[in-house]
């Protein structure tokens, strides 16, 4: 790679697949026969908060298994950030903490975090504790507030969109990794970057939905294609 371009990287579930976390839209993408669209909505939470908590508790348990650790792709992105410095931004759709564990710092969790809970009254985020359930009053405004998963569900606005769009419009290079390109607004980031003159690159196991929008595509497992591309 050239010297210090302004880089925005978008990651999706595919980057964590080789760490042992399931992606959403492959043959293993169902959770107890529920599609993610059936449990990751405000309507699902209103109708059955216990079921939604069960879904996220299962995901948290999986994330905390000792075998689930960052892989070579997470590590390569942490090294890239060190190399580039302040002109690097990692935007992840993932709610796991594998990028942080690999050492990434300049990052945005646009769909929230598994290991965090949000007060439905104040909107404040709190570190997740194992004792939390759908009846737990929040520490910030008890007894009125209740804690919900700190996750952006379908129909909700992803986080820090203004910061993301600004970085995309200034980027020289946009790299999309391990995402199917089926969920908006993230699926539209390539267009924003391209319209602003960035070189756009896809690194994914297979061509994503919008792969023809990218200037270059490299297909294969993230643990191979990401280190190969960034180093
Ligand atoms: C590998 C690999 C390996 C495998 N190496 N690669 C029509 C109807 C209703 C709604 C809409 C509609 N059209 C658009 C919408 C809006 C909706 C949306 O996009 N829906 C689509 C399903 C159609 N979007 C929203 O509602 C968003 N909010 C919104 O739009 O607000 C309004 C707004 C207006 C204006 C500006 C901005 C916003 C919110 C979306 C929230 C998404 N939430 C979820 C679940 C919560 C998190 C959780 O519980 O974990 O986030 S959905 C789920 O999908 C999760 C993911 O972050 C997201 C993306 O999935 P991802 O990461 O791409 O995973 P997969 O499984 O799809 O793909 C994995 C890829 O990896 C595959 O390509 C594999 O090949 C590859 N892979 N192994 C490399 N080893």
Image: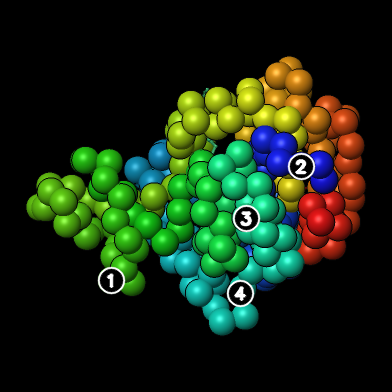
- Nearer to us of marks 2 and 3 is 2
What residue sits 45% from the left and 53% below the top? 113
Q: Residue furthest left?
A: 143
Give the residue at mark 3: 82
Q: Residue furthest bottom?
A: 66
SS at circle 4: loop
Question: Looking at the image, which is closer to me, 47 or 108?
Answer: 108
- Asked if 155 appears above or below 59 in the picture, the reply is above
- Nearer to us of marks 1 and 4 is 4
Q: Pick whichever of labels 2 and 4 is earlier in the sequence.
A: 2
- Asked if 2 appears above or below 127 in the picture, the reply is above
Q: Which mark is residue 131?
A: 1
**Residue 181 seen from this side:** no
Q: Pick whichever of labels 2 and 3 is earlier in the sequence.
A: 2
Residue 212 pos. (x, y %): 88, 30
Real-space Cα distance between discs 1 and 2? 48 Å
């Amino acid at each position: 790679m050239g010297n210090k371009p302004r880089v925005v990287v978008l990651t999706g579930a595919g980057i964590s697949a080789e760490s042992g976390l399931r992606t959403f839209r492959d043959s293993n993408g169902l959770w107890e026969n529920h599609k993610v669209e059936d449990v990751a909505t405000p309507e699902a939470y209103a109708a059955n908060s216990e079921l939604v908590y069960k879904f996220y508790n299962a995901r948290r348990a999986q994330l905390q298994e000792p075998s689930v650790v960052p892989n070579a792709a997470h590590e390569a992105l942490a090294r890239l950030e060190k190399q580039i410095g302040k002109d690097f931004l990692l935007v992840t759709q993932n709610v796991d903490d594998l990028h942080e564990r690999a050492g990434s710092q300049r990052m945005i969790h646009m769909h929230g975090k598994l290991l965090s809970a949000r007060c439905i009254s104040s909107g404040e985020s709190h570190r997740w504790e194992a004792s939390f359930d759908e009846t737990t009053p929040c520490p910030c405004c008890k007894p009125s507030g209740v804690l919900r998963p700190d996750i952006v569900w379908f129909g909700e606005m992803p986080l820090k969109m203004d910061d993301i769009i600004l970085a995309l419009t200034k980027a020289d290079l946009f790299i999309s990794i391990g995402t199917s390109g089926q969920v908006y607004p993230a699926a539209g980031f390539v267009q924003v970057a391209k319209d602003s003159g960035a070189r756009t690159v896809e690194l994914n196991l297979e061509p994503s939905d919008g792969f023809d929008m990218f200037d270059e595509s490299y297909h294969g497992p993230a643990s191979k294609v990401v280190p190969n591309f960034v180093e």
